[in-house]
Image (cartoon, rainbow, N blue to C red):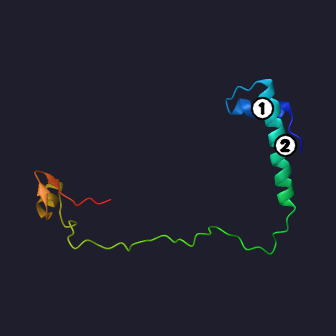
Amino acid sequence: MQFTIKEVEHIAQLSRLSLNEKEKEIYAEQFSKILAYIEKLNMVDTSNVQPTFQITGLTNIERRDSLATTTLSNASSGAEMVEQSPEKEERYIKIKFSQ
């Protein structure tokens, strides 16, 4: 497929790019070469090839969620919850923060 200058102008407008005439010709040629290569790739028979999603062999490391030993669910108010908490500062509950 040959890219036309008109198509390059349209893509440039959508991309908010201002191109001079020489750049438009260069991009038209480059886009045409890219599409020709994609057409060539589309001719390759991949019917017996298994899909590959990643090749590094890395897996996600996950940890199990667990309930905290101290629960504050029996508190009927915020002040009561602060009073029941193991660590507090003034009217705030102190928590351990780790990244």
Q: Residue 13's image quarter?
A: top right
Q: Residue drawn 13% across and 61% down? A: 87
Which amino acid, by three-letter code, is at mark 2? Ser
Q: Residues within 10 Å of mark 2 (few under 14, many from 20)?
A: some
Q: Residue 75's image quarter?
A: bottom left
Residue 83 drawn at (x, y percent): 11, 60
Residue 13 sits above or below residue 90 on the image: above
Q: How many marks?
A: 2
Q: Residues within 10 Å of mark 1 (few under 14, many from 20)?
A: few
Q: Secondary structure at mark 2?
A: helix
Marker disc for residue 32:
2
- What residue is shown with label 1? 10
Q: Residue drawn 33% across and 59% down? A: 99
Which amino acid, by three-letter code, is at mark 1? His
Q: Residue 82's image quarter?
A: bottom left
Q: Residue drawn 13% across and 64% down? A: 84
Looking at marks 2 and 1 on the same chain, the residue that comes earlier in the sequence is marked by 1
Marks 2 and 1 in Cβ contact (< 8 Å): no
Residue 71 drawn at (x, y percent): 21, 69
Residue 78 relative to residue 99: left or right: left
Residue 97 drawn at (x, y percent): 26, 59
Nearest the eye: 14 or 79? 14
Q: Secondary structure at mark 1?
A: helix
Report the quarter where the N terminus lies: top right
Residue 50 sits above or below residue 9 on the image: below
Nearest the eye: 8 or 80? 8
Q: Nearer the viewer, mark 2 or mark 1?
A: 2
Q: Residue drawn 22% across and 74% down? A: 69
Nearest the eye: 22 or 1? 22
